[in-house]
Image (cartoon, grey):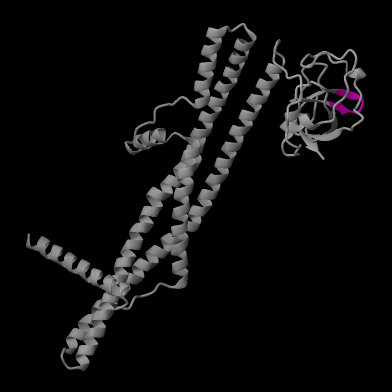
Amino acid sequence: MDFNMKKLASDAGIFFTRAVQFTEEKFGQAEKTELDAHFENLLARADSTKSWTEKILRQTEVLLQPNPSARVEEFLYEKLDRKVPSRVTNGELLAQYMAEAAGELGPTTPYGKTLLKVSEAEKRLGAAERDFIHTASLSFLTPLRNFLEGDWRTISKERRLLQNRRLDLDACKARLKKAKAAEAKATLWNDEVDKAEQELRVAQTEFDRQAEVTRLLLEGISSTHVNHLRCLHEFVKSQTTYYAQCYRHMLDLQKQLGRFPGTFVGTTEPASPPLSSTSPTTAAATMPVVPSVAGLAPPGEAALCLEEVAPPASGTRKARVLYDYEAADSSELALLADELITVYSLPGMDPDWLIGERGNKKGKVPVTYLELLS
């Protein structure tokens, strides 16, 4: 009991001494031991790393799960060390509604058939989104959280210890200074100065030891950056895979819808902003148009009289093929990635398609597979 009381009294005395030292430093009434410039740079870099890691983590969480209520629910499950229940993605929910609508409105009608096809595509998009969220969480979010909840907490703890050791050191320096001043006035015995010097040596040793421990941890931030760099590459890879899957699913859907009997095809060219080489999907609206040719099949049908189609007098455009494309029928032109072809549009043609020419071959080509060149 007496030992515990003495320890509490000692701890209270140390806390009071540190508080006095800290307060006097703030008011400029006491000297403060400064850390070297390299150490200060390490501290600043660590603080910056922690701050930006938190911001990137939070915003990535918003990207993967925009619903704040769902994020709170997932956070609570993680804190309780329980598995987060599977949640239907927005794409999967939309797919479900479209399928139910098709069943009620008539699955054999053009609208119902299209709803079913789009529903299947949205379901695949939802599954791709689920895979992306899972992969990104494991490869990117988890390492960031581990740093904040593990390494950073250790660094913060050692920095607090270093701060306490520094306060103790400066308090010992102040006591020694006062003891020497009192000795000069012959008001203290030499043993008081010796005691103060001994306390200073102990405090200096403890401060140096703690400074070295903290320095090593701060220098480990470089390894943290390397690890986060690797995780960032993994995140970009998973995001690229996700968007590539989405692009492929939608291209397949667009191709299927273009072959549906009764599929809606516009008969006039829609208004469109000026053509940009980075926006190939708007290309058809500004392409040179060939005058109507006798015997040309209506837009949207496969049987084009391609032999009778000639390049327009207003000129043509060159285009670079972005991806391989396999022609579905004789009206389409097969494409190979990176080849150059000549393209132009027909009046009333689906804006997602162009007429492409390569040598003595011609046929319809999808705009999304092309990069139009100026």
Residue 68 shown in magenta: no
Q: Is residue 59 left or right of residue 80?
A: right
Q: Position of residue 109 (x, y in %)?
A: 62, 7
Indicate whether 74 appears above or below 24: above
Using the image as rendered, state which of residue 213 and residue 104 is in the foreground: 104
Q: At x 51% / y 49%, what residue is drawn?
A: 228
Q: Which residues are magenta?
A: 356-362
Of 214 and 281, which appears nearest the observer?
281
How many labels were placed on the picture? 0
Q: Is residue 1 visible?
A: yes
With respect to residue 182, does 236 lie above or below? above
Q: In terms of image quadrants, where is residue 321?
A: top right
Q: Residue at x 34, y 66 (%)?
A: 210
Q: Position of residue 297 (x, y in %)?
A: 83, 13
| Quarter containing the N terminus | bottom left
**Horizontal and vertical percent for residue 29?**
29, 78
Q: Nearer the viewer, residue 254 or 203?
A: 254
Q: Give the quarter of the image for residue 272.
A: top right
Q: Residue furthest left?
A: 1
Q: Residue at x 89, y 12 (%)?
A: 295
| Majority SS type along the magenta span | strand
Quadrant of the image occupied by residue 190: bottom left
**Which residue sits at x=62%, y=12%?**
111
Question: In the shown orientation, is residue 273 left or right of residue 168?
Answer: right
Please state if 223 lies on the left or on the right of 258 as rendered.
left
Give the position of the C terminus as an image quadrant. Answer: top right
* Residue 183: percent from left, percent from top: 20, 91
Q: Is residue 220 visible?
A: no
